[in-house]
Image (cartoon, rainbow, N blue to C red):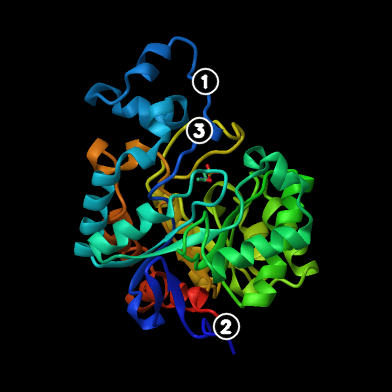
Amino acid sequence: MSALSGKVQTVLGLVDPDQLGRTMTHEHLVMGFECSYTPPPPGDEAVAENPFQMQHMHWLRQNPYSCRENLFLSQELSALRDELLAYRKAGGGTIVENTTTGIDRDLPALRQLAKETGVHIIAGAGYYIDSTHTEATRKMSVEKLTDSIVSEVLHGADGTDIRCGVIGEIGTCWPITESEKKVLRATANAQAQLGCPVIIHPGRDPAAPAEVVRILQESGGDINKTVMSHLDRTIFDEGELLEFANMGSYLEYDLFGTEMLNYPFNLKVDMPSDSQRVKTLAFLVKEGYEDKILVAHDIHTKNRLTKFGGHGYSHILKNIVPKMLTRGIAQHQVDKILIDNPKRWLTFK
Ligand SMILES: CC(=O)NCCS(=O)(=O)O
């Protein structure tokens, strides 16, 4: 039995799982998302240059990736500190910070934020999507990738002694690239060694989550300890959703607060509203999956911070939970989604 067994690993060290409280399982605090920059619609170039004004807030909500400045959450440490203090006040206890190699993980900043706010922060090991893999990463064997991920959990990452407490978000596209497949196999190997939680960013196709699960299974991954993120923009058909749910991973709805018409990463996708997300959660609860659901906001752009008129990290606790309670999800089921399921997932075997 390892020293991690039965514990959760935060950026400040190991904690007892009962200390976590309400947990958002997919957020970013300090990251850079330049890899997803999308040029603005024709005619909107001037707005994109100078977006942080009241009259441009709606434009930013609709076009968050078309303004470079909006993509650097890392520039907002003071606002992030205020957000975390507000999150605690709203009843939040823990945040899983999913920033991995490729999108500017900053572990010392996470440690500082955890110290200053009292929020438990759990950092992510591993690699984001293919376009952010360096040549050195692409050349690594599965064994070397496994070693690097294991080391980030056991010894610390990015030249620090700050240890990651989950593997992920591991980035994949659709179709899954060869480099991403290697990282997935390494993730499964590392999970088999460590008994740790894993979280996946699937490609934007309904077939993508199941394909990731198959690759992880082939390499000995523990699907019961794996989260499939971003289901809100990935699987829409109820039958397909139940088929995927039956594969055994946690089912994460983590784009609460994001309501946009033209989703630039896949124009075929109709991004759901928060009301539609709650309806899907109620459906999954009715179908018996209340022990598998997780929720979050996946904040990764500045406009979603309350400083810039956004919903912030407390939106689920303040606005979505009351809505869930009026839509057939009972308080004890809400508690499972916010407390018990994250705790079970995050505890090392
Ligand atoms: C940071 C990140 O990967 N966010 C996911 C955004 S997406 O639109 O759900 O792919």
Amino acid at circle 2: Lys
Disc number placed over residue 34 in the picture, else none: 3
Can you see residue 339?
yes
**Contact check, label 1 and label 2, Cβ < 8 Å:** no
Looking at the image, which residue is at 72% across and 40% down? 135
Dot 3 surroundings within 10 Å: few (below 14), some, or many (20 or more)?
some
Dot 1 surroundings within 10 Å: few (below 14), some, or many (20 or more)?
some
- In the figure, 12 relative to 70: above or below? below
Closest to the observer, 194 or 207? 194
**Which residue extends farthest bottom?**
1
- In the figure, 152 relative to 171: above or below? below
Q: Please tell me whether mark 2 sits on a helix, a strand or a loop.
A: loop
Can you see residue 291?
no
Amino acid at circle 3: Glu
**Separation of marks 3 and 2 at Cα, in angstroms:** 36 Å
Give the label, 1 or 3, closer to the camera: 3
Look at mark 2 in the image and give the residue it sits on: 349
Sequence order check: which comes first, mark 1 or mark 3? 3
Looking at the image, which residue is at 27% across and 63% down? 115
Q: Please tell me whether mark 1 sits on a helix, a strand or a loop.
A: loop
Looking at the image, which residue is at 38% across and 55% down? 108
Q: Please tell me whether mark 3 sits on a helix, a strand or a loop.
A: helix
Amino acid at circle 1: Pro
Q: Position of residue 232 (x, y in %)?
A: 52, 51
In the displayed structure, does residue 254 sit left or right of residue 60?
Answer: right
Sequence order check: which comes first, mark 3 or mark 2? 3
Q: Position of residue 244 (x, y in %)?
A: 67, 63
Disc number placed over residue 39 in the picture, else none: 1
